[in-house]
Image (tube, grey):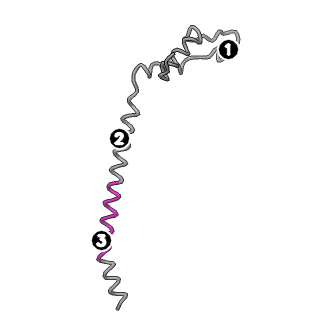
Amino acid sequence: MLAAAEAAREGKRAPWRVWTLAGATAVVVVVLMIAVTLQRRTARMIPGDELAAAQKLAEWRAPSDGPAGDSGAGDFADDAEARRILSEWSGEDG
């Protein structure tokens, strides 16, 4: 008899627990969706001048990258220009 009364009491408490778990799950899902949306928006926001400098730097070839006999200057006249673009891209002055 005691086991039946305890089981009946548990049966009445179960819906409250289920709704609490469902609500907490919904809150977590909404928070994750907002976080992913904000992350995507901030990842796309790269200033144009910074992007251009990064692309130019990525295409730069060091003097040792070219075949033998090639000066390796590539798009830059010398290493000073490469350092200038790198410092602009990294935000350093000087």
Residue at 36%, 54% in the rendered image: 28
Label 1 residue SS: loop
Relative horizontal placement of residue 42, taking residue 81 as reference (left or right): left
Relative horizontal placement of residue 77, taking residue 29 as reference (left or right): right
Q: Magenta includes 15?
A: yes
Cα separation, mark 3 vs mark 2, equals 33 Å
Instruction: Using the image as rendered, state which of residue 38 and residue 65 is in the foreground.
Output: 38
Label 2 residue SS: helix
Q: Which mark is residue 67?
A: 1
Q: Residues within 10 Å of mark 2 (few under 14, many from 20)?
A: few
Q: Amino acid at mark 2?
A: Thr
Above or below, 18 relative to 27 = below
Q: Amino acid at mark 3?
A: Pro
Above or below, 29 relative to 1 = above
Q: Quadrant of the N terminus?
A: bottom left
Cα separation, mark 1 vs mark 2, equals 46 Å
In which quarter of the view is residue 44 placed?
top left
Residue at 66%, 10% in the rendered image: 70
- Tag nearer the camera, 1 or 2: 2
| Secondary structure mostly taken by the magenta-highlighted segment of the chain | helix
Relative horizontal placement of residue 94, taking residue 46 as reference (left or right): right
Label 3 residue SS: helix
Residue at 70%, 12% in the rendered image: 68
Q: Which residue is mark 2?
A: 37
Residue 69 x/y as whole percent: 70, 9
Q: Which residue is mark 3?
A: 15
Write the start and end of the magenta stretch as one range: 12-27
Cα separation, mark 1 vs mark 3, equals 74 Å
In which quarter of the view is residue 80 placed?
top right
Q: Which mark is residue 86?
A: none
Q: Amino acid at mark 1?
A: Pro
